[in-house]
Image (spheres, coloured by chain):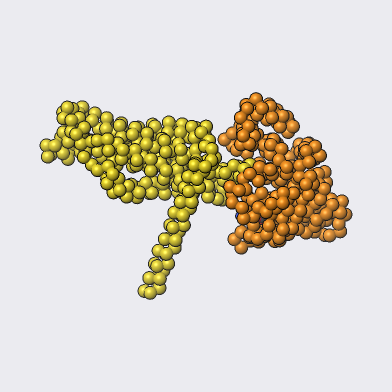
Chain colours: A orange, B yellow
Amino acid sequence: MLAVAGLTKQIGDQQILRGIDLQVASGETLVIIGRSGSGKSVLLKHLIGLMLPSSGEVFIEGRQIVGLKERQLLPIRKTVGMMFQGCALFDAMTVEENVAFPLREAGERNAGVIRAKVAEALEVVDLTGHEQKLPVNLSGGMKKRVALARVVITRPHCVLYDEPTAGLDPVVSDSINHLIRRLQRQFGVTSIVVTHDMKCAGHVADKVAFLHEGAIYFYGAFADLVASQDPLIQDFIQGRSGDKD
Amino acid sequence: MVALFMLLLRFLGSTALSLFGYLGELLFLMLETARSFVTMPVRWRLALGQILEVGYRSQLVVIVTGAFTGAVFAAQTYFQFHRLSMDTAVGAVVAVSMFRELGPVLTGLMVAGRVGAAMSAEIGTMKVTEQLDALRSLGVHPVDYLVVPRMIAMMLSMPMLVAECVGIGILTGMFVAVHLLGVSQVWYVNYMLRFTALRDLEMALTKGFVFGLLIVFVACNEGLKSKEGAVGVGRATTEAVVIGSLVILVINFFLTMVLNVFFPTT
Ligand SMILES: Nc1ncnc2c1ncn2[C@@H]1O[C@H](COP(=O)(O)OP(=O)(O)O)[C@@H](O)[C@H]1O
Ligand SMILES: [Mg+2]
């Protein structure tokens, strides 16, 4: 479904990704964990061609996308949804317009259909009643949920989540985890979830990849990650920095 | 001495290189926009919104500019011409100048300030807050969505704004000359009509059209490539206004030379 091979990315003289190989099967959920700045967001952006690799290959549904022109990428991207770390809501549009945007772009013109689907999507993320608000007037958690509604409304085959639960209260985090899980179970959505929330990882992961300094340090089942005796992994899981007071 | 010369050469070289690089960027954006305009469905609703923003809401600025330029130009011309007893020729001079140079250039500069800045700030903010990436991730090309509607709005609005500026300028010029300075209205109008023709209006509209395109491409290009958060957006906005204005002044000279072949003065 989604795969990268030998992916490297250099910006200026910083080597951000150093040879990444990953495969995500259809319907599978891969969780990518790693310290802040390890290159998780950059990796996600490569997966839908928002950034171009310095070398390596990226495949979406078997199709190599590196080297395609922006215009050729656009239809392919419609099958892959991405929820950005900063939400990236269109700040000139209301919540309703943001969520309806992908539908309109998919060619839906019937106002009744759009309204019904938007209402349904907002209900799923528990935002009914906030349709007319502008993104600036939303809290961080609400923005995340609007972003999620905007991604899933067109039922993409695959969704990339960039820290979907970061900065949210535990209850909302839990409901988002359930949502990710439900999309996968009910609709067979392939998911890649970037997070450093271990609870989220444990909840949704089929496989876990631990990204460290632009390379994959560990790849396997969540249980194996937790059981690993590797000090780097243990420090990450336990949240130890090694600093002394 | 040789070292100094080399330094100068290197400076000129790098300046020329970055100039060509910039022109290349602009040309690339223009081609992409033209291609999108021709081959992709146009978002008319967005274009209409932009017309409202750049055309309708720029009017006050343009009217004030036109009015006071016409007024001061008529007064100044009168002061000079009066000594030569050519009072009645003031109307012709004011009208031709407003049509051919002052109207288009001043409207262009005002719109570059007002609209160019707004466009680059808006698109630049979308860039640095990843809204452009979000557009792309939803399968929408930023040029289709942002640049084409703005280009259409400018192509339609700028000629009208120029016409408005010129019209107001000529009227206030006449008011100042006739009512404040005592030039004979009949002769003022008579000479004005004799020395202006449809060609002058055509020149004004053509210039407005070209300046509109220059403003929109410079501003959108600055917005699309802006980086580094709020500082970057601020820089993009400043550059959009400065470069936009300079380009208008420079291109205006060449346009005048070329257009005089097609629309010679009476
Ligand atoms: N557009 C960019 N230009 C330069 N450096 C970048 C850019 N995007 C990310 N980086 C750098 O790449 C590294 C990884 O960033 P990122 O993928 O955002 O980390 P995270 O794993 O926290 O998501 C960081 O050191 C960051 O500074
Ligand atoms: Mg990140």
Q: Quadrant of residue A166?
A: top right
Residue at the outermost top position: A112
Vertical side of A232 occupied by B198: above or below: above
- Depth check: B173 or B160 in front? B160
Left or right: where does residue B250 sit relative to residue A220?
Answer: left
Residue at the outermost front position: B39
- Marks counted in the figure total 0
Question: At x 51% / y 33%, what residue is drawn?
Answer: B44
- Depth check: A21 or A180 in front? A21
Left or right: where does residue B143 sit relative to residue A179?
Answer: left
Vertical side of A190 occupied by B51: above or below: above
Image quadrant containing the C terminus of chain A: bottom right
Asked whether residue A112 appears in the rendered view, the answer is yes
Question: At x 48% / y 32%, what residue is drawn?
Answer: B48
- Residue B195 in the image: x percent, y percent? 20, 36
Question: At x 21% / y 40%, what residue is drawn?
Answer: B266
- Residue A203 in the image: x percent, y percent? 82, 43
- Residue B187 in the image: x percent, y percent? 16, 30
Question: At x 38% / y 43%, what residue is drawn?
Answer: B210
Asked whether residue A174 appears in the rendered view, the answer is no
- Depth check: B195 or B89 in front? B195
Left or right: where does residue B98 sit relative to residue B184?
Answer: right
Q: Quadrant of residue B89?
A: top left
- Residue B8 in the image: x percent, y percent? 39, 67
